[in-house]
């Protein structure tokens, strides 16, 4: 089965095999072909180039993309879309002046979601979560990382990870599962952190490993949550089961957490609303991808990741949604890209690089996703007729997507 797109106005994110991430000043460069063709064979990108080199093929479905832009689907490397219920009341509480910390201290926040999740059946959580997954696919996301972390009990965490596994089995989108038992300390462990960490390491991790339920391990490394020393212990335990770290860090404070993550081989460090010069130096020449979550900053009115400063220092940057019920109840990567341009002063080229090729790196799927490269998955966003790809972040409130292709099929 072959599909040939012809007369593509702009074919974006053209990369050679082996390019897995973009850093520093290179992030301002988004390779593209104007008036292009793109050939899909089954679920793989087979060929592409300028229309003057378009092959003459028989027995092929031809799609005329005149006026339309084609780019790889978004890669959302940080989400919490498996959860139960919502936290709408906390949204109103914040409007009325309560801080994130104040809401958490009275049993809200993560602990609120944990209570709801543990009261909800696995089947019901799956039904709620699949609707969110279907929505983000329609919005152009073709790969997504999903975290646990709203169970905070052995059975609750296993329940979440089993739901993620079911989603992976039932949908064509690439899904990676991250174990985030270290999301918060349950009330009964507030004064006994070591006992909860022992539960994570000695009970949760062995069961997760025995069912092969996770690809990565995470912790909320933050003042008032998991300390640097506690997070190191969790990262080391995860590595024994083959789980690479992807860590929440520097959302509210900088406590040398990034240094610990880099030294322990973290694939990504996520949030980074607060970044020091020392943090930037640690990240230079490391394999760790910084990940910004601008719609979280937007929703709870905290600072934005200093993207300009980081890229000027030569760092790479990825963008993700942080889709979760409390601080970012949206998985719309189009809004994330637009917000990065508007609030973080990233150029459209930088933002698209961050949301595609660098997002794929932060998910560990660079070989198959994130760019228009021969041999990669045919995961495509086909826009409506637009003036240029700059219109995507410019018209931030308009749905400019005409079709989404995942694994060679329109969804």
Image (cartoon, rainbow, N blue to C red):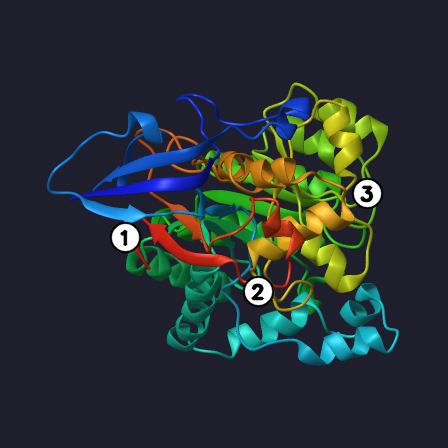
Looking at the rendered image, the disc whose residue lies closer to the viewer, 1 or 3, is 1
Q: How many neighbours does mark 2 have within 10 angstroms: few (below 14), some (14-19), or many (20 or more)?
A: many
Query: Which residue carries the number 1 mark?
Result: 409
For numbered disc 3, what is the local secondary structure?
Answer: loop
Q: Residue furthest left?
A: 59
Kindly report the distance in space between the C-alpha atoms of the residues bearing marks 2 and 1: 33 Å
Q: How many neighbours does mark 1 have within 10 angstroms: few (below 14), some (14-19), or many (20 or more)?
A: some
Give the residue drawn at x 69%, y 38%: 347
For numbered disc 1, what is the local secondary structure?
Answer: strand
Tell me where residue 317 sits by quadrant: top right
Q: Is residue 373 above or below residue 226?
A: above
For numbered disc 2, what is the local secondary structure?
Answer: loop
Give the residue drawn at x 34%, y 31%: 51
Tell me where residue 189 sits by quadrant: bottom right
* CB contact under 8 Å: marks 2 and 3: no
Query: Which residue carries the number 3 mark?
Result: 274
* CB contact under 8 Å: marks 1 and 3: no
Is tag 2's residue or tag 1's residue first in the polypeptide sequence?
Answer: 2
């Amino acid at each position: 089965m072959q599909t040939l797109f012809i007369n593509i106005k702009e074919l974006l994110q053209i990369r050679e095999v082996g390019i897995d991430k973009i850093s520093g000043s290179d992030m301002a460069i988004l390779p593209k072909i104007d008036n292009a063709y793109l050939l899909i064979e089954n679920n793989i990108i087979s060929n592409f180039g300028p229309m003057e080199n378009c092959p003459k093929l028989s027995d092929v479905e031809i799609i005329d993309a005149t006026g339309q832009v084609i780019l790889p689907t978004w890669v959302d490397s940080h989400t919490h879309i498996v959860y139960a219920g919502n936290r709408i009341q906390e949204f109103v509480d914040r409007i009325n002046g309560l801080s994130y910390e104040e809401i958490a201290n009275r049993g809200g926040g993560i602990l609120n979601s944990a209570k709801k999740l543990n009261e909800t059946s696995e089947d019901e959580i799956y039904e709620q979560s699949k609707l969110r997954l279907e929505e983000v696919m329609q919005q152009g996301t073709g790969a997504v990382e999903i975290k646990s972390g709203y169970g905070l009990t052995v059975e609750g965490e296993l329940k979440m990870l089993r739901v993620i596994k079911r989603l992976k089995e039932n949908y064509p989108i690439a899904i990676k599962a991250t174990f985030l038992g270290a999301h918060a300390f349950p009330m009964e462990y507030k004064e006994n952190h070591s006992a909860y960490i022992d539960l994570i390491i000695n009970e949760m991790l062995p069961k997760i490993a025995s069912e092969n339920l996770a690809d990565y391990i995470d912790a909320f490394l933050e003042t008032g949550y998991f300390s640097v020393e506690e997070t190191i212990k969790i990262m080391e335990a995860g590595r024994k089961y083959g789980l690479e770290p992807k860590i929440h860090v520097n959302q509210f404070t900088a406590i040398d957490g990034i240094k610990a993550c880099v030294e322990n081989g973290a694939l990504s460090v996520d949030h980074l609303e607060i970044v020091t010069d020392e943090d930037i130096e640690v990240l230079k020449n490391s394999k760790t991808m910084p990940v910004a979550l601008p719609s979280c900053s937007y929703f709870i009115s905290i600072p934005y990741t200093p993207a300009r400063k980081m890229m000027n220092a030569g760092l790479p940057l990825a963008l993700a949604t942080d889709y979760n019920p409390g601080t970012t109840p949206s998985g719309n990567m189009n809004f994330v890209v637009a917000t990065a341009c508007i609030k973080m002063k990233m150029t459209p080229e930088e933002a698209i690089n961050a949301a595609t090729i660098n997002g794929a790196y932060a998910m560990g799927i660079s070989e198959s996703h994130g760019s228009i490269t021969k041999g990669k998955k045919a995961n495509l966003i086909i826009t409506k007729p637009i003036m240029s790809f700059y219109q995507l972040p410019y018209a931030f409130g308009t749905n400019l997507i005409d079709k989404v292709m995942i694994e060679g099929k329109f969804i």
